[in-house]
């Protein structure tokens, strides 16, 4: 199998890396994290101009026809640069879900606007009672005249404060923990009865709890078939998990580089601390973990577009679990090898470490995905 990247993929990475080096330096990123918006609107417009926002969409909807490998390359650099823009939620998860499951009319109405950077979306799929279980849905949807009425509460909706639309899972039948009976609805931000309780995340991003009180939507707001929304949500989330794995790999590589440079320059007893054999061994363990994590991210990306749910689930859960363990090892070692400087806000290492922690907790942590992977072995 040929694992080399195409000239177009290399050019895409080079372009994004130049932007990060020029316009998204660490101090600028810290300013954006503390701003009211929480990210750069100018950067989002630039991503649209570069084709990043339309990358995974089909050409007939204004996209570039990219695949999960292309997304992996972008997400690695998003990790390296600690970019704050809602790429994962809007493009990878919600954009992918609309392309896979929405009607032609909805695709034509939304995908071009998403690719142009005009609108953003967020997936409201998780609830407090279910934690990472997408099938645990108490939010209800009942038929009304000409449409549906939604009521319930969704927790930790990533990038919700900046979203123009929400993809909301709600139960139209069955019990609260059954796979059948879950439907998916497109809900506009300004809908009457929809309330956001927003807050910053530990890694500088934004999230919100979304409360729906008798929110009325039209019949065309239903995405996919009534009661069969869980499968399409899980497919979109699996793509998101593969993308998060790639982001973690980018951060791990950046942490290793920063730590190695520190070991070469920080002196103790008149010599660089990188001369000490014990620290060399720890650095070697970090580099090995990085290469293994990279391989797992590739496996996840290769299977992210699979039509076989069991095959896809096995690959992405295995990758998320392993990369979560590798990220913890590399993150903790990087902080310790930097000494007290590894935890201060003015040093990028602490921000990398916090983002790796958030990645582990997003879309299922190590324990959750180890259990899900083990279920595929039965």
Image (cartoon, rainbow, N blue to C red):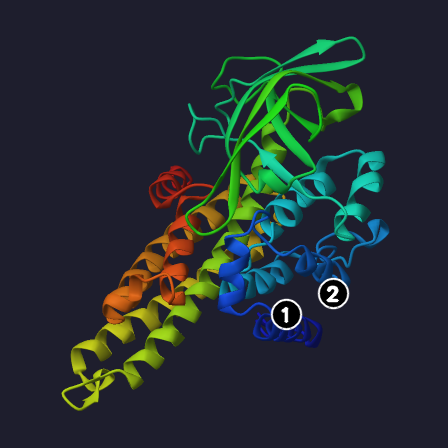
> Is residue 272 toward the left or the right of residue 241 in the image?
left
- Residue lying at 51% horizontally and 13% vertically, measured from the top left: 175
Which quadrant is home to the C terminus?
top left
Residue 298 visible at all = no
Residue drawn at 70 percent across, 38 percent down: 164
The crowding category of the residue bearing disc 1, from other C-alpha atoms within 10 Å (few below 14, some 14 to 19, many at least 20), is some
Residue 121 circle label: none
Look at the picture and state if 19 lies above or below 300. Answer: below
Residue 177 rendering spot, x and y as whole percentages: 47, 19
User: Where's residue 145, x and y in %?
Assistant: 79, 8
Label 2 sits on residue? 50
Marks 2/1: CA–CA distance? 9 Å
Which residue is rendered at x = 52% and y = 21% of the image? Answer: 137
- Nearest the camera: 57 or 331? 331
In the picture as drawn, the residue positioned furthest to the bottom comes out as: 270
Question: Horizontal and vertical percent for residue 342?
Answer: 30, 66
Residue holding disc 1 = 16
Disc 2 element: helix
Q: Is residue 313 above or below residue 271?
A: above
* Discs 2, 1 touching: Cβ within 8 Å: yes
User: Disc 1 on helix, strand or loop?
Assistant: helix
- Name which of mark 2 and mark 1 comes first in the sequence: 1
Instruction: Identify which residue, 44 or 66, lies in the foreground.
Output: 44
The x, y position of residue 140, in whole percent, is 59, 15
Say whether residue 228 is visible. yes
């Amino acid at each position: 199998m040929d694992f080399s990247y195409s000239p177009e993929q290399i050019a895409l990475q080079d372009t994004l890396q130049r932007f990060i080096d020029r316009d998204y330096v660490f101090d600028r990123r810290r300013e954006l994290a503390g701003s009211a918006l929480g990210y750069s609107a100018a950067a989002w417009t630039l991503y649209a101009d570069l084709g990043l926002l339309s990358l995974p969409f089909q050409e007939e909807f204004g996209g570039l026809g990219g695949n999960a490998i292309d997304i992996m390359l972008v997400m690695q650099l998003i990790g390296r640069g600690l970019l704050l823009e809602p790429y994962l939620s809007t493009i990878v998860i919600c954009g992918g879900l609309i392309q896979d499951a929405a009607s032609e009319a909805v695709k034509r109405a939304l995908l071009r606007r998403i690719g142009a950077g005009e609108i953003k979306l967020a997936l409201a799929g998780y609830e407090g009672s279910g934690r990472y279980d997408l099938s645990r849905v108490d939010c209800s949807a009942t038929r009304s005249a000409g449409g549906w009425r939604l009521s319930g509460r969704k927790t930790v909706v990533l990038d919700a404060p900046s979203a123009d639309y929400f993809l909301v899972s709600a139960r139209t039948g069955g019990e609260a923990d059954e796979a059948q009976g879950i439907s998916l609805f497109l809900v506009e931000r300004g809908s009457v009865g929809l309330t956001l309780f927003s807050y910053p995340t530990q890694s500088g991003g934004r999230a919100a709890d979304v409360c729906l009180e008798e929110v009325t939507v039209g019949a065309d707001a239903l995405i996919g078939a009534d009661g069969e929304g869980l499968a399409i949500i899980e497919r979109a989330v699996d793509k998101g998990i593969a993308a998060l794995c790639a982001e973690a790999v980018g951060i791990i590589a950046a942490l290793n580089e920063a730590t190695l440079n520190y070991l070469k320059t920080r002196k103790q007893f008149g010599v660089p601390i990188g001369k000490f054999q014990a620290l060399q061994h720890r650095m070697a363990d970090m580099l090995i973990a990085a290469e293994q994590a990279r391989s797992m991210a590739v496996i996840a990306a290769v299977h992210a577009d699979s039509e076989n749910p069991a095959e896809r689930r096995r690959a992405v859960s295995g990758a998320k679990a392993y990369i979560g363990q590798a990220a913890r090892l590399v993150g903790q070692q990087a902080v310790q090898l930097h000494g007290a400087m590894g935890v201060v806000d003015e040093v990028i290492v602490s921000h990398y470490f916090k983002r790796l922690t958030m990645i582990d907790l997003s879309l299922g942590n190590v324990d959750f995905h180890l259990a899900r992977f083990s279920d595929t072995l039965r």
